Amino acid sequence: MLVDEAYVAAALDAELRRHPQLDARERALATELAYGTMRTEPVLRARLFAHAPKGVSDERVLSHLLVAAYQILLLDRVPAFAAVDAGVNGVKRERGPRVAGFANAVLRKLAKTGEKLTQAQALREAVPAWLWQDLIKSVGEEAAQALLCADAFTGLRLRPGAALPEWLSELQQGKVSPVSRLLRGAGDPRQKPGFSEGVFTVQEEGAQVIGLALGVRAGDKVLDACAGRGQKSTLIAERLQSGKLVACDLYPEKLQALAEDTARLGLPAVETRAVDWSVGQGGLPGDFDRVLVDAPCSGTGTLRRRPEILRRLQADDPARLAALAESILRSAASRARVGGTVLFAVCSVLEAECEAVVARVADVLEPAVFDAPELSPELVAGKTSVRLLPGLHGTDGYFMACFRRR
């Protein structure tokens, strides 16, 4: 369940930090329960409410019931009686014996049905019909399934030339980013050796690919138009040397994280500006060699990490966000010099937010082949757009398209 609209990843990490005594197996189970319950919540609610026709208005009670229902319906390694007992005891601690009696009755009735669901069945039922259809249309059924439940590693980006601590040098490299390492399991890598010294940055592998796809060279003048907290900005800064980088975002408080990270990585300070691209260009000149537009989107490429998106996303959101992305792309791209490179990216895989946006900006932007020597030719050679997918690349889902300003 969401608490104060927090992402499940952030809420789970906070709870695990509060309980350092948990061993690796317990942490893995907690992680599966948190993500699994969020992914399949509509299915769990339907099964629970069949035995509680009036529903459950108390969110804390409902949270315990949902986690117990997930174990009963989808986990073979947890006996049903153990899931019932854990759920009832949790309710009893928070709401007392009377409410616990209600929870006991509901969970026992659910367990008595003997119903079991596969992950595929539960996920298919949990995804809104309109979204499932759009996902299949955009990437196919197999890739859509992977977007929902494929294993997700924590991505780490290595600083070029840094001497690696032993634990970091032993990690597996990612499939598509040459500067990535993949960390499995819960826990905050920022507490590990090397982070405070600027040896690595926590960054999902696909996000690294987007930064590398811009193809920055030393001496370039670069605009990161939607920098957020600046992970791609620092990747760009590591490659610029004598060049210039301007990082912008609608929310100036996010850019403060960029200032802190450049200091940690030993990079020169980056010029930052708060810019609302939907209304103007913030007084920036139109002579940038390369412009990165990592536009706001539905986030459907990140569903395996952020299953709560399924609760928030509405059927008209992709079209609305695509219109916003087009507006931002047009505005930010106008800051590139004629013939300059513009890279458009979203962490969505839906055609409405990807190919459809590309088609609508053809009057100002000409598709251009990626010029990204750090990326594998197999990934980008001869291409003007690429869609990254968990099943193919091990990353979250992304779409990126390369242009030349007309």
Image (cartoon, rainbow, N blue to C red):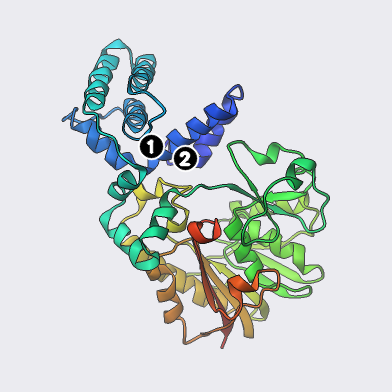
**Which structural element holds mark 2?**
helix
Mark identifier at residue 37: 1
Task: Give the amino acid type for the residue marked by disc 2 in the picture.
Answer: Val
Where does residue 145 sit, x and y in percent of width and height?
39, 54
In the image, residue 170 sits, relative to residue 58, either above or below, namely below
Q: For mark 2, does the 10 Å Cα neighbourhood hold few (<14), some (14 to 19), or many (20 or more) residues?
A: many
Q: Residue at x 40, y 26 (%)?
A: 78
- Quadrant of residue 140 within the rendered picture: bottom left
The residue lying toward the viewer, choosing from 282 and 327, is 327
Marker disc for residue 8: 2
Q: Residue at x 44, y 40 (%)?
A: 35
The residue lying toward the viewer, choosing from 132 and 363, is 132
Query: Would you say residue 284 is visible in this rendering?
Result: no
x%, y% of residue 85? 35, 17
Quadrant in which the N terminus appears: top left
Q: Nearer the viewer, residue 222 or 157?
A: 157
Q: Is residue 85 above or below residue 271?
A: above
Secondary element at image label 1:
helix
Q: Amino acid at mark 1?
A: Thr
Question: At 47% across and 53% down in the image, what residue appears?
Answer: 302
Residue 188's quadrant in the figure?
A: top right
* Quadrant location, the C terminus: bottom right
Q: CA distance from mark 2 to mark 1?
A: 10 Å
Rendered location of residue 304, percent (x, y) = 46, 49
Residue at coordinates 31% horizontally, 58% vertically from top-left?
A: 132
Up/down of 28 relative to 211, above or below: above
Pick whichever, 376 or 97, lies toward us.
376
Q: Which marked residue is nearer to the observer: mark 2 or mark 1?
A: 1
Q: Residues within 10 Å of mark 1 (few under 14, many from 20)?
A: many
